[in-house]
Image (tube, coloured by chain):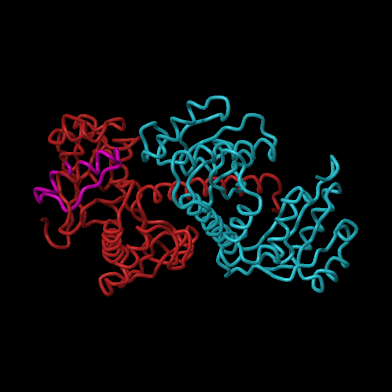
Chain colours: A red, B cyan
Amino acid sequence: MSDPGKIVIALDGMGGDKAPDMVVRGADIARQRYPEASFLLYGDEARLRPLVDRTRWLKSACQIVASADVVTNDDKPSAALRKRRTSSMGMAIEAVAEGKADCIVSAGNTGALLANATVGLRMLPGVRRPALCTFLPTVRGETVMLDLGANMQCDANNLVEFAVMGSVFARSVLGIDAPTVGLLNVGAEEGKGNETLRDAAAMLRAADGAVTFHGFVEGNDIGGGTVDVVVTDGFTGNVALKTIEGTAKLYTGFVRQAFKTSTLA
Amino acid sequence: MSDPGKIVIALDGMGGDKAPDMVVRGADIARQRYPEASFLLYGDEARLRPLVDRTRWLKSACQIVASADVVTNDDKPSAALRKRRTSSMGMAIEAVAEGKADCIVSAGNTGALLANATVGLRMLPGVRRPALCTFLPTVRGETVMLDLGANMQCDANNLVEFAVMGSVFARSVLGIDAPTVGLLNVGAEEGKGNETLRDAAAMLRAADGAVTFHGFVEGNDIGGGTVDVVVTDGFTGNVALKTIEGTAKLYTGFVRQAFKTSTLA
């Protein structure tokens, strides 16, 4: 681990559609905002070096570590795992496993990242499945939502674990004391949805204290900010997340159209 | 059946949060727009009569049929079915079954409506499950989406039937010649999602001609208008629909806030 008060970020320099340029630019902004951060940047040194040299804040806080391989967007998780020791993504994860870095950031292939992280870092005790998680804007701030696509089918135990993981995340990252958790369903009433959801709700009600369980929430509660953490299976979460993106884009188009039609609109 | 070119609408006068006032006002607007429509209005005659008498267009084209019972929002489908012969909703459905009306419109209890319609009108040959369906605005017009909550769990056959039903609906109501159909999934690639979705996709590909199958679509394709018909199970469809509502509401708030902050925004 790094010094207390400092943070070392292992960064996959080659991951993401606009890597490595965008990754280096992002890290430069991060370093400006968080002077306590330093970076281990993994990737093609010949490409990374000139980009880092051009940065304003990053260059004094960044060590480039050469890696021979890159995980592409088309790589299956199995293919990504085979280059775990040689790819920028795999080596950045390994840095965390070895205690050289505090966390790993990658904008690369999500499935590959999940597979590499699961193998390289393992799960916390009691957690059987990893989950994808994000913040979403709401009418009263931000809400954490998970899973967003790592687990297509979930049993009640998985959902309960996601509730605990989401609570910890909301507490440590958003700084919310006792984050409220809602299970995404088709109605708020107890009998709604399927058996998996009803079982998970019963377990969360029984687990009083570990999780502040609000009950079932519906799709409109995500944007409504009804709870701090929305828990769902990866299929539903992925559809909901992309539906939000599509609706926001549609709405932006409507607003733009209204302005074009009339400047007084 | 009514005369060709004319349409008789059986209307549940007592269904909906703001019934009967809103129902009568809506029917008045409908009659103004569609002079070929006439109405059989079911409900409490003492309440309906003065409302209809005050309308401009409806009163000359509306026959009130007294019904003793009302299906409330809290009625379980089983309770609604028991008053099938006496409620405004049940009697309006019966009018279609008896050929006195061409269609039935109700803004009442959805579960009760589904149960009453299924028992009173039965399914078309080859259709095993009813579905809830709506139009949604998209960047290029309107898209039909189903199921929105009638069937929490669906097998591949159900999804294929929804694809056929949605196609017929888009063709007859939206006037689209060969409506394209997409199956809602977490990715467009063939291997994505679960077995049910992959089986349904295989069946739809094989059913060439009956349905113009586009393939898998994602949540952002709903607002994007990628296809004319989006097919999904009732759980996912319900979450997606309500997520759209919540996002639209959130976005409206953002725009309003922007205007308040600066009149030049």
For the N terminus of chain B, which image quadrant?
Answer: top right
Front-most of residues B114 and B250: B114
Q: Residue at x 84, y 40 (%)?
A: B5
The magenta stretch is A92-115
Q: Is residue A94 magenta?
A: yes
Q: Position of residue B227 (x, y in %)?
A: 55, 35
Q: Position of residue B97 (x, y in %)?
A: 72, 51
Q: Which corner quadrant of the image does residue A86 belong to?
A: top left
Task: Please state if A77 lies on the left or on the right of B164 as rendered.
Answer: left
Q: Residue at x 77, y 52 (%)?
A: B9
For the C terminus of chain B, which image quadrant?
Answer: bottom right
Q: Residue at x 81, y 55 (%)?
A: B39
Position of B36 relative to A70 (above/below)? below
Q: Which corner quadrant of the image does residue A114 belong to?
A: top left
- Label count reads 0
Task: Please state if B168 lies on the left or on the right of B52 as rendered.
Answer: left
